[in-house]
Image (tube, grey):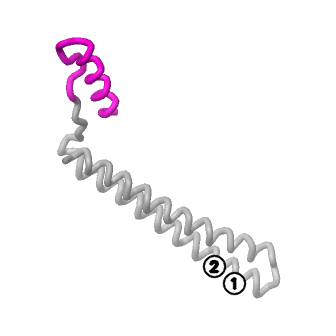
Amino acid sequence: MSQLLHTVNDVLYLAADDPIVPDVKPSVPGTLQTPTGKILGWTAGVGLSLAVLGGLAGWACVAIGHNSERAGLASRGKQAIVWSLISGMGIGVTSGLVLAFYNMTQG
């Protein structure tokens, strides 16, 4: 958003002699930095632990499905394993990106 405001400021500055839109540098107050980091950390931790539990449940379904010759249960267990891996990677990447963008605005 600040890039858009900066561009608008440049365009309007060329049209007028005085800058119309002030230079905006977004920042979060220092008192919010620690709680926000804790919330993101807890959210990522809980999400990743649920993804691990989903993967373990998927492996259990695969084992039970193959041993009891229930192809449907084994198939759903394999899907659960794949989706728990995808969700774990998504949570890890998303929380990392949010923290990276958040830390970039602080500098």
Direction from residue 39 to residue 91 in the image, left or right: right
Whether tag 2 and tag 1 are in contact, CB under 8 A, the answer is: yes
**What's the magenta region?**
1-23
Q: Which residue is mark 1?
A: 63
Question: Which mark is drawn over residue 39?
Answer: none
Q: Relative to 45, does residue 59 appear above or below in the rendering?
A: below
Q: Please tell me which residue lies in front, 15 or 88.
A: 15
What residue do we see at 18% from left, 45% from top?
30
- Estimate the x, y position of residue 35 in percent, counting from the top left: 27, 50
Q: In what quadrant of the picture does the N terminus appear?
A: top left
Q: Tell me which amino acid carries mark 2.
A: Trp
SS class, disc 2: helix
Q: Which residue is mark 2?
A: 59
* Magenta segment includes 74: no
**Residue 65 lies in quadrant:** bottom right
What residue do we see at 26% from left, 24% from top?
10
Q: Tell me which amino acid carries mark 1.
A: Ala
Q: Residues within 10 Å of mark 2 (few under 14, many from 20)?
A: some
What residue do we see at 65% from left, 80% from top?
60
Magenta stretch, main secondary structure class: helix
